[in-house]
Image (cartoon, rainbow, N blue to C red):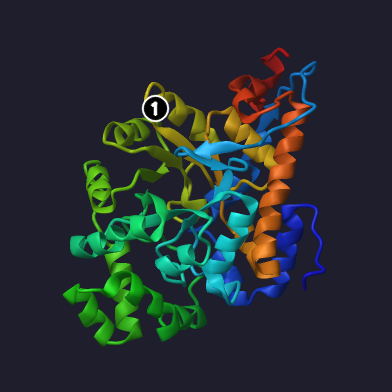
Amino acid sequence: MLNFKAVSLSDYEEEAHKRLPADALTFYASGSDGEVTLKENNISARRYRLRPRVLQNVSHVDTSSTILGHPVAFPICVSPSAWHKFAHINAEKETARGAAKAGVAMTVSSVSTVANKHITASNPGGLFFMQAYVMKNRRLQRLMLTNLKEYGFKAVVLSVDCPVISHRRKQFGAEMLGRIESEEMNSYRVINYLQDDPDVKKAYKDGPKAFSNYFFNQVHDSSPVDPEFIRVIKSYSKLPVVVKGILTGKIARLAADHGADAVWVSNHGGRQLDFTPSTLDVLQEVVDAVKGTNTEVYVDSGFRTGTDAFKALALGAKTVFVGRPVLWGLAVKGSDGVCDVLRILQNELAQCMALCGCPNIASISRTHVVAENAYLGSKL
């Protein structure tokens, strides 16, 4: 297993598709409805062309950066994704180990298969953000967030694009639903959320299926978040808040004006509303909208090469996040695979930087990329 060698993320994807159980693969790889956005994410980077600056000193290329003031080896970090135990027995702890070895941040999903405190405790040198949904039960919301700082998390990533769960035609077969509702998959939620909340206790007492249904009704049948709720999340967690699921400049600015420390441009990897634009196509609008604030801009959905990431950085993103490629690495080689996937992206980014005349991340600018439809009119 550890003899597997890869030169690109596509090698990991191909191998993971062979090794993962069919239901797990379907869950990880699928999108919503007709998967138009999912497919668009995977091709959108092709519509942007690079404008290299030669005659620059690139004898040394430095990929290091920061995210919310925390140093990272390169600005490509791990997106939140659910149920890593389907890919590896050590689940999120193994993913965290790989991200820490690569020197980047990991965003832990609130639908993980290991308790929050165990993920951070097993990787004390790691950099961790915690993803959260808006919940109807505000006591439960507070319980979920109160101890995050104590556990070592550095920020809360608030997903605001899931007031209801999307229609996903492929992913929830009977076998998958049975695993999701099992005692094993629900046990971590007891540690994370049970505590002293009476409604949660009652749901858990009624059995795994009832508890699972209660949890998903909380996070996917809640009302759309009011922008003032950003400050509420800050008050609960005492941590910076990143607002994830932004696709327009106007909403990005609204989030920034209501206390968001960062906005995360995301269409949920094509898993929520179908027919939304690719994130690269709206990134520049969002960056321009928060200009003049201290709000950082992150982006995910469909990034598969270091060159893709370079294009996002050139358009103004502070950090690029990847989700599915990390799962492919996890499924094939555990933490070593996660680290390898991330290092492949780092090496590709460094090569692209050198060829574009960028010795460091700060030297990447909007002048280095142009939309394909404007290319014939551009001047090098």
Whether residue 62 is visible, yes or no, is: yes
Q: Nearer the viewer, residue 216 or 79?
A: 79
On-image quarter of the N terminus:
bottom right
Q: How many marks can you see? A: 1
Q: Which residue is mark 1?
A: 290
Q: Which residue is drawn at the image coordinates 54% and 74% (left, top)?
A: 85
Establish if 192 lies above or below 366: below
Which image quadrant for residue 144? Answer: bottom left
Residue shown at 58% from the left, 67% from the top: 94
Question: Residue placed at 57% from the left, 74% from the top?
Answer: 90
Q: Is residue 252 left or right of residue 265?
A: left
Task: From the top left corner, tell me how far across and down residue 107 is, in percent.
Answer: 48, 54
Q: Position of residue 108 (x, y in %)?
A: 46, 59
Question: Farthest residue in the left direction?
Answer: 198
Label 1 amino acid?
Answer: Val
Up the image or down, 51 lies above or below 267; here it is above
Percent x, y for residue 36?
A: 55, 51
Q: Look at the picture and state if 316 lies above or below 11.
A: above
Image quadrant holding the C terminus, namely top right
Q: Secondary structure at mark 1?
A: loop
Front residue of this view, candidates 142 and 121: 121
* Badge 1 density bin: few <14, some 14–19, many ≥20, Cα 10 Å: many
- Percent position of residue 268, x then y: 47, 52
> Which residue shows up at 69% across the image and 44% down it?
346
| Quarter-of-image position of residue 307 | top right
Describe residue 219's horizontal placement relative to residue 226 as left or right.
right
Regarding residue 29, the answer to whether it shows in the image is no
**Relative to 334, 138 lies left or right:** left
In this view, which residue lies farthest toward the front?
124
